[in-house]
Amino acid sequence: MNKGERWIPALGLCLAILLGCQPAAPPAPGGQEEDRAMNLETSDFGTAPGGQAVMLYSLTNAHGLRARIMTYGAIVVSLEVPDRDGDMADIVLGYDDLAGYVADNPYFGAIVGRYGNRIAGARFTLDGREYRLAANNGPNHLHGGLRGFDKVVWSAEPVRRSDAVGVKMAYTSPDGEEGYPGTLTAHVTYLLTNHDELKILYEATTDKPTVVNLTHHSYFNLLGQGRGDILGHELQILADRFTPVDDTLIPTGERRAVAGTPFDFRTHVAIGARIGAENRQLAFGGGYDHNWILDNQDGDLALAARLFEPTTGRMMEVLTTEPGLQFYSGNFLDGSITGKDGAVYIHRSGFCLETQHYPDSPNQPEFPSVVLRPGETYTQTTVYRFSAR
Ligand code: GLA
């Protein structure tokens, strides 16, 4: 190779770095796939109702997995992962464009806050003072209220690491927003790693005592979105107990053993195997819509659940630092939503695994605390890890 020929690839590499591409990562474990360069691209995704521009971050890892995440609601718009033959499918429910999310979104792909899940009677007392919230779910408050974190535009910056590409989102919720005390400054970082993980790192601080419980609300279908129901997926949840609820889905305070009930997912069971069983708790939820008390309660990142879809071989593991996991089997989907690529979201065509503190914790002092005080930092980490077999 003469001097001139050596310059051409060197120039190419400089250009790639300038354009935001990264050099190829080390080979995949097992070496079954050829690695490509990671990629991070941004594009416009429209204008939110308040007039703010919405950006879309498209993240691709070294194995070709791709996540598209937008700044409206910090929503995961699509997530493409391979099956056992290497065929890619988008495994999260959603809409083709921003208008779909703005018009009618049952929290598809969103970051939920300030409080994921329900607060009984839409009120709570903290340090002797009562705070009233919007009752947007029967008598209760759900998922942060009328305009929760799923409906605001986050600011964002790209993240490039040696083994991941990502986007760091920030939102400052003013004191009193949706009835919650304190200015809450929240950061959520999504990373798509070369270990085929979508990793979500959360952080929040406040200037007054408040409550916080952030979570992620993707509806997954490992067959591919729009390809039928999720009842054949096999689920394992590493939990001996769950929190039974009343008929408005507020925990009664009991920590009930799963043994001998349709809530026992300690070994893999098809989601549909017992969902129609005669059971008061299943009747209240219209299926599964409950919080499991994870075996791991020490705040370290640990395996919480595993999903396996037998026809495609796709597998998803969920790891979290949180003490609870809301498993929602898409019971409110009824075919009335047409989502991406014309897909009709039939009953139970997606499920959520929301890592969180327990529902109604602000009113249940015996549950792990969700109180955040000035000077403290709320953190949580959740990993959705993909593979196929
Ligand atoms: C959560 C709740 C469900 C439902 C969905 C959104 O999972 O627990 O009851 O509200 O969000 O439809």
Image: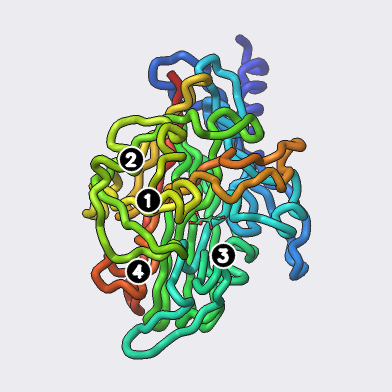
Secondary structure beneath label 1: strand
Q: Indicate the amino acid at tag 4.
A: Ser
Horizontal side, residue 50 vs residue 200: left or right: right
**Residue 335 numbered tag:** none
Q: Indicate the amino acid at tag 3.
A: Phe
Q: Indicate the amino acid at tag 2.
A: Ile
Q: Earlier in the sequence, mark 2 or mark 4?
A: 2
Q: Residue at position x 38%, y 60% from top?
A: 245
The residue under label 3 is: 149
Where 253 sits versus 362, above or below? above
At label 3, counting other C-alpha atoms closer than 10 Å, the crowd grade (few under 14, some 14-19, many 20 or more) is many
The residue under label 2 is: 237
Which of pointers 2 and 3 indicates the residue nearer the eye? 2
Secondary structure beneath label 4: helix
The residue under label 1 is: 325
Q: What separation in Å lies between label 1 and label 3 (alpha carbons)?
A: 19 Å
Q: What separation in Å lies between label 4 and label 1 (alpha carbons)?
A: 14 Å
Foreground residue, 136 or 40? 136
Where 216 sits versus 345, above or below? below
Secondary structure beneath label 3: helix
